[in-house]
Image: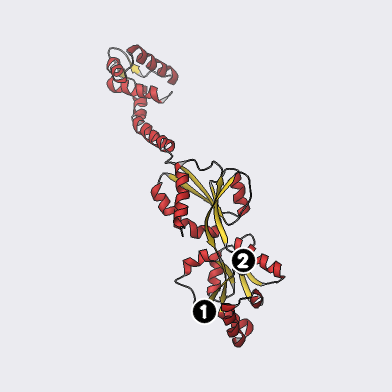
Amino acid sequence: MNFLILKYFKTVASELNITHAANKLYISQQALSAHMRNLEEELGVKLFNRTPRLSLTDAGKCVYEAVLGFDDVNSTLNDKLNAIRNEERGELRIGISFTRGQFILPSVLPQYNRSHPQVRINIYEERSNALMDRLLRGEIDFWITAENPSVEGLVSEPLFRESFFIVVPLRILEKTFGPEKAGKLAQKLEKDFEIEDLIDCPFVLLNPGNRSRDLFDNIMRTRKLTPQIIMETDNSQTAFSLAQKEMALTVYSDMFLRNYSSTLNPDVKLIPLQKYIPSDVLHVFYNEGGVESRYKKSFLRHLHSAFEG
């Protein structure tokens, strides 16, 4: 059974006249009658009483009721297929860390969704190595990361630079070094920061595997230092909030600090780490030839537009 035969049946059932139905459908009466007989054989029931005049049997009435919505179904299906053909409908799959997703996605997706309401958006928030594997397997379309893998077949586009800061509550300096030394150290941090000056302070850090944590650990290894880590977390907001509440020091990206620019604790200092950690360039990666559809190209445009400058 196919849509065309059902369309033929609906017309015959509406007209209850083979000649009129055939004229409407622009086919011969013989061909239309043959289609109706074939449909009855396929369903195993008699759909029409043919004498004294054409009428629907009980089975015919049942099938007619079922196909009354055929035009709506067919129209909806055609609309969906046309949207796919015109590249207005589809699925957008984005891989990004949970931490970066909190900042980047709200800056991009609302506007993108208004432009492409028929595109379903799926977000994969996982570790970098898992997301790279997904991208290589074709399970996601875009991977937004500061990693810089050299893998054949992957295309990258730079988005923006992010710098890192050490978040230093002055209360922790006083608690660790005493008021006098803490005051002098606070002034020194503003002018000539040395990571060794803070090594005796407690730290709240993101778990290993996070970009800022891995960069910080690399500094520690290079300088043969052992920080006092009193807590680890997967949530960057938790680490920053605890530093703001003057529990410990933490390391944070300026990308996220923008979200808190109006609510920063004045007794917490933000000390740039560019002396130890160069600025990261955030990239969007995708497979070569993987952004042919219009809605995927549009996502790239929205992504660049959101962070221009």
Quarter where residue 163 is shown: bottom right
Measure the alpha-carbon separation of dots 2 and 1: 24 Å
User: Of tags 2 and 1, which is closer to the observer?
Assistant: 2
Q: Is residue 33 left or right of residue 152?
A: left
In the picture, measured across the screen, residue 2 lies left or right of residue 95, that is left
Residue at position x 36%, y 30% in the image: 70
| Position of residue 200 measured from the top left corner of the image (x, y, whole percent) | 66, 77
Q: Which residue is mark 2?
A: 277
Towards the viewer: 125 or 105? 105
Q: Which structural element holds mark 2? A: loop
Q: Where the N terminus falls, by quadrant?
A: top left
**In the rendering, at what x and y percent does residue 82 appear?**
40, 35
Dot 1 amino acid type = Asp
Q: Earlier in the sequence, mark 2 or mark 1?
A: 1
Rendered position, 210 above or below 81: below
Residue with the most extreme bottom position? 180
Disc 2 and disc 1 in contact, CB within 8 angstroms:
no
Looking at the image, which residue is at 47% across and 48% down?
A: 121
- Given residues 62 and 268, the one toward you in this image is 268
Amino acid tagged 2 = Ile
For residue 294, side relative to residue 136 (left or right): left
Q: Residue furthest right?
A: 224
Residue hosting label 1: 267
